[in-house]
């Protein structure tokens, strides 16, 4: 959903075209308080490579507005070329456009990606308990704001599992599935592990779609893992994170709705999730090519974990048996969730293409972090991008420019990079045999 009166996060951006929080709002202007005043802009330390800027400039029909509004739209792009050696080992070359970790954007559903990796990592740390991603996980409730889970109707046998939650996250950006992983990991583990891996500015601080006070997001549910006979293999008590994180001054917009009232001033995002585009891009590279990042940046994943993640990052909702997704459901049409290269297109997915990615969209931000391959042409590249699509500067008004600005930008950017890659000379082509999957159904 894109109804952002609370900290709501989008599943697929097509929802915004079909749903709204309300047809009209009562406008009561509330003066800005000191907490909502926009801080002075920091010195511009953005990274832009001449090559990528020139590539955009040579396609003015697509990117003249992007170039003109790069700052107020907070357009950030990272493109990574991949060249293979004779032994198949990849060599990476990165290009940046307007990338600045200091320029805050709301990371929306893309936070589900590193949390999914961490869930598999934590299971590996607990493997002596006899549990894995397919073990039944029961979530209990320790406070009145928490909810319990004893079964999952979208599985073949009704059992909730980490594996199934990750499937729902990767194929349909399921918010509840993310919240269950957040509760299994705990806020402290999520942030401490990402900081250990060098992602020092990351703050993942809250569940999605349900608005809870800061202290309640610090508290996570009791968890039990059961064997086939319903015997407890591992029990994790309720957790409370007491770590105090670096204070932030992140704010956005010139006004925002609080209920039915319009507040005059920037909206405070300092207690909301924060992950930079560079960190997302690096985390994706660490999954696809773990050997290309420092040892301390790698997640503790088995070979099976890696294959599992890549399969469901690339599997389309319409290829899924469990969970079952209907092709006539708006957010589950075949190309849903593949913004780069495909935008808002519907219809059959090109069979030679696979996009291993995670998208997000909320509070006017549209994001995609992707590894794109063309099996027939032997082509591969990484592409990550974010754009702020909110021309009126008002948040929570259900009026964002996803359809007119965000999705066309994503589609055109992906296609321009794709067309460039097709013509780029490569001495050795990749062997994609390890990432060609048999999906659940054709």
Image: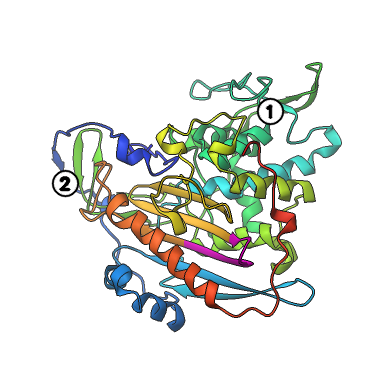
| Mark 1 → mark 2, Cα distance in angstroms | 44 Å
Q: What percent of the width, then of the height, locates residue 145?
A: 48, 24
- Residue 277 vs 189, above or below: the answer is below
The residue shown at (61%, 66%) is 377
User: Residue 45 — which label?
Assistant: none
235 shown above or below 370: above
Q: Is residue 261 magenta?
A: no
Q: Nearer the viewer, residue 76 or 332?
A: 332
Look at the magenta stretch and give its main secondary structure.
strand
- Identify the image quadrant of residue 155: top right
Reading the image, the residue beneath label 1 is: 237
Q: Residue at x 49, y 36 (%)?
A: 215
Residue 143 visible here = yes
The reply to whether discs 1 and 2 touch (Cβ–Cβ < 8 Å) is: no
- SS type, badge 2: loop
Question: Which part of the image, by quadrant, shows the C terminus?
Answer: top right
> What is the total number of numbered labels drawn onto the structure image?
2
Using residue 209 as the reference point, say whether residue 293 is left or right of it: right
Position in image of residue 267 (x %, y %): 30, 49
Foreground pick, 369 / 351: 351
Rendering quarter of residue 181: top right
Please state if 26 lies on the left or on the right of 291 as rendered.
Answer: left
Q: Is residue 4 left or right of residue 80?
A: left
Measured as percent of width and height from the top left, residue 287 is found at 67, 57
**Circle 2 is placed at which residue position?**
31
Q: Residue furthest bottom?
A: 50
Asked if the stretch drawn in magenta spans residue 378, the answer is yes
Q: Give the farthest residue toward the top.
A: 229
- Whether residue 247 appears in this view of the structure is no
Name which residue lies at 71% across and 43% down: 120
The stretch in magenta equals: 373-384
């Amino acid at each position: 959903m894109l109804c952002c009166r609370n900290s709501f996060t989008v599943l697929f951006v097509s929802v915004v075209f079909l749903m709204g929080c309300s047809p009209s709002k009562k406008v009561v202007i509330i003066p800005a308080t000191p907490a909502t005043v926009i801080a002075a802009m920091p010195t511009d330390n953005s990274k832009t490579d001449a090559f990528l800027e020139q590539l955009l400039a040579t396609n003015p029909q697509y990117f003249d507005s992007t170039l003109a509004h790069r700052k107020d739209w907070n357009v950030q792009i990272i493109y990574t070329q991949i060249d293979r050696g004779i032994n198949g080992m990849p060599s990476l070359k990165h290009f940046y456009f307007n990338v600045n970790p200091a320029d805050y954007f709301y990371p929306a559903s893309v936070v589900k990606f590193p949390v999914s990796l961490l869930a598999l990592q934590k299971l590996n740390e607990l493997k002596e308990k006899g549990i894995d991603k397919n073990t039944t996980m029961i979530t209990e409730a320790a406070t009145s704001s928490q909810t319990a889970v004893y079964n999952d109707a979208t599985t073949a046998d009704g059992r909730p599992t980490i594996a199934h939650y990750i499937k729902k996250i990767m194929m349909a950006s399921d918010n509840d599935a993310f919240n269950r992983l957040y509760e299994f990991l705990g806020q402290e583990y999520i942030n401490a592990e990402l900081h250990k891996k060098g992602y020092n500015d990351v703050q993942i601080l809250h569940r999605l779609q349900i608005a809870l006070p800061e202290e309640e997001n610090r508290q996570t549910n009791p968890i039990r893992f059961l064997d086939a006979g319903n015997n407890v293999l591992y029990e994790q008590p309720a957790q409370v994170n007491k770590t105090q994180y670096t204070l932030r001054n992140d704010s956005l917009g010139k006004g925002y709705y609080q209920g039915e009232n319009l507040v005059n001033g920037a909206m405070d995002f300092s207690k909301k999730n924060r992950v930079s585009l560079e960190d997302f891009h690096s985390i994706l590279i660490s999954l696809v090519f773990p050997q290309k990042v420092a040892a301390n940046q790698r997640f503790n994943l088995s070979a099976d974990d890696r294959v599992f993640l890549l399969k469901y990052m690339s599997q389309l909702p319409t290829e899924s048996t469990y969970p079952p997704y209907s092709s006539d459901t708006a957010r589950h049409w075949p190309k849903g969730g593949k913004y780069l290269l495909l935008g808002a297109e519907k219809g059959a997915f090109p069979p030679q293409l696979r996009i291993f990615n995670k998208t997000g969209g909320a509070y006017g931000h549209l994001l995609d972090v992707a590894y794109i391959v063309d099996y027939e042409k032997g082509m591969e590249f990484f592409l990550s991008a974010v754009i702020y699509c909110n021309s009126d500067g008002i948040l929570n008004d259900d009026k964002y420019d996803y359809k007119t600005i965000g999705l066309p930008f994503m589609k055109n950017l992906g296609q321009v990079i794709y067309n460039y890659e097709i013509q780029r000379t490569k001495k050795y082509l990749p062997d994609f045999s390890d990432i060609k999957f048999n999906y659940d159904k054709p």
